[in-house]
Amino acid sequence: MDLWETRRKSLLWLDNDLASESQYLIKGYTMIDECITLFDEVSQKEKSSLNGRFARICGLTTTKGRNLLLACHSLQLDALGQESGALLRPLIEVVELLNYFRLDPNRVDIAIEEKLPSAGKIAKTISGHFQSLRDHLNDQASHFRFGFHSVFHLLDKQTLRLKAVQSHSPQVLKTNFATLSAFLSFLLLESVSCLFVLGIDAKNLADRAETWKGELKTMFPNIAINKK
């Protein structure tokens, strides 16, 4: 049995059929890495001041978000896009946390003291827009269910027999990349906004992030991410 056959096929597509989409994602990750570097520089320089604490907590939050994005990305290469949905809920929480801190930088002290409100209370405080998506993920991805969307990929579409090894196509992988790119944009733009709270001149990075986001619909014209 070749455990990595599906991933090897996906990696070949990244060099051919999906080369543009792959480079687009890499560009997004690169800008997130720039944010993390800037957060770290301020954290090291400002130490225990409010700016230092804000930079450290936002840097940790952005780094966790990057890890969750990359974990989703990795699972998608193995044709485990449905399973990667379980990681989108904590990714939403990361994005909403950055918003929560940005609106009141003193809230980072609540995080340092490990006294943060629940994710639901944070979402209400910032008037979050992900509730319906959170509900969908709760039903279809975060917990194991036997509904159509949860189990159909486990069956051969022709025979309906169990399919131990998952497979996909360049088009399916592209569709999953569209969702990944949307969440990457949420994390990127919220992280950049937090840099401005620190007084960092991030205009160039912000402009590049907005340009990158503007290309999202062109790169993935059928994308439909419901945030309401």
Image (spheres, rainbow, N blue to C red):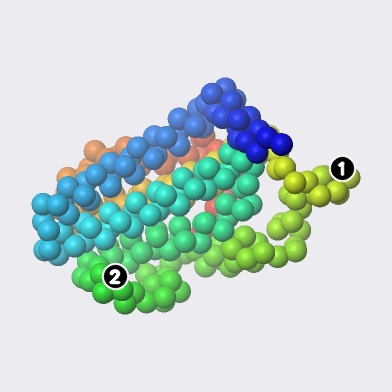
Q: Measured along the vertical axis of the image, is residue 160 above or below residue 28?
A: below
The number of callouts visible is 2
User: Residue at point 43% right, 67% down?
Assistant: 128
Q: Is residue 178 in view?
A: no
The foreground one among 132 and 97 is: 97
The foreground one among 93 and 87 is: 87
- The residue where tag 1 is placed is 158
- The residue where tag 2 is placed is 111
* Precedes in sequence: disc 2 or disc 1: 2
The foreground one among 205 and 41 is: 41
User: Residue at point 57% right, 45% down?
Assistant: 75
Q: Is residue 183 in view?
A: yes
Asked which quadrant contains residue 226, the reply is bottom right
Secondary structure beneath label 2: helix
Give the side of residue 95 with respect to residue 75, left or right.
left
Q: Amino acid at mark 2?
A: Ala
The foreground one among 124 and 38 is: 38
Q: Measured along the vertical axis of the image, is residue 133 above or below residue 158?
A: below
User: Residue at point 33% right, 58% down?
Assistant: 61
The 10 Å Cα crowd at callout 1, few under 14, some 14 to 19, many 20 or more, is few
Asked which quadrant contains residue 126, the reply is bottom left
User: Residue 176 in the image: x percent, y percent?
Assistant: 59, 43
Secondary structure beneath label 1: loop
User: Residue 117 in the image: x percent, y percent?
Assistant: 37, 77
Q: Amino acid at mark 1?
A: Gln
Asked which quadrant contains residue 103, the reply is bottom left
User: Residue at point 71% right, 36% down?
Assistant: 1
The 10 Å Cα crowd at callout 2, few under 14, some 14 to 19, many 20 or more, is some
User: Residue 122 in the image: x percent, y percent?
Assistant: 39, 72
Query: Looking at the rendered structure, which numbered label has been put on residue 168?
Result: none
